[in-house]
Image (cartoon, grey):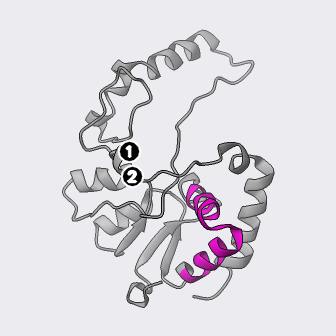
Amino acid sequence: MRPEYKGEEQVADPNSSGTSYTMLATLIQLFGEPEAFEYLKKLHRNVNQYTKSGSAPIKAASLGETTIGIVFMHDAVTMAVRGSPIKVVAPCEGTGYEIGSMSIITGARNLEAAKKFYDWALSAAAQNLGAQAESFQVPSSRGATTPPQAPKLGEIKLIDYDFAKYGSSAERKRLLEKWSKEVKSIPN
């Protein structure tokens, strides 16, 4: 860790943020669990706040309240598009990612309306609205147009993220308990 960034980095708490849990799981997949936790302990020295929201760190950076916000790239792009002096970068070692999803709950009271919304949300027309709302994720519909500001996935080293393992409730619970005990609880 670079000592000049002591107290200058923000990241969300992985207990409340899927963004930050993705970071935790990514580091483990890149470096192995022992090395990832050693890295997180060193990073902890530089963290001025563990936020509840995954996008809060980049909002703070855009306001000059912190120097570095560790977030999903599309959230950083939004702040840059709005004119904040944000430089969007991806780790050269590789990065994890999210795949947004939806579900219809079994026994839903308004099942037909839910199905209509589901079909609409997956359509190219609906996903093309993202850029208008300053949402710069890469759309899942092949018919949708990727906003030009969206992260260029072909230029980013993505890891082979193990969604089955790191999406399991048991593994998530174990890692969050370990992070809370071994990282967040230590003085920085």
Residue located beneath label 1 in the image: 153
Q: Secondary structure at mark 2?
A: loop
As measured in the structure, the alpha-carbon distance from the residue carrying label 2 to the one carrying label 1 is: 5 Å
Callout 2 environment at 10 Å: few (<14), some (14 to 19), or many (20+)? Answer: some
Residue at the disc numbered 2: 156
The segment highlighted magenta reads: 22-42
State which quadrant residue 90 falls in.
bottom left
Question: Label 2 is placed on what type of residue?
Answer: Ile
Relative vertical location of residue 7 with respect to residue 155 in this rendering, above or below: below
Residue 33 location, x and y as percent?
70, 68
Quadrant where the C terminus sits is bottom right
Question: Is residue 35 highlighted in magenta?
Answer: yes
179 sits left or right of 40 in the view: right
In percent of the image, x 59 and y 9: which residue is there? 112
**Residue depicted at x 63% and y 27%:** 103
- Tag 2 and tag 1, C-beta contact below 8 Å: yes
| Residue 48 x, y percent position in the rendering | 47, 79
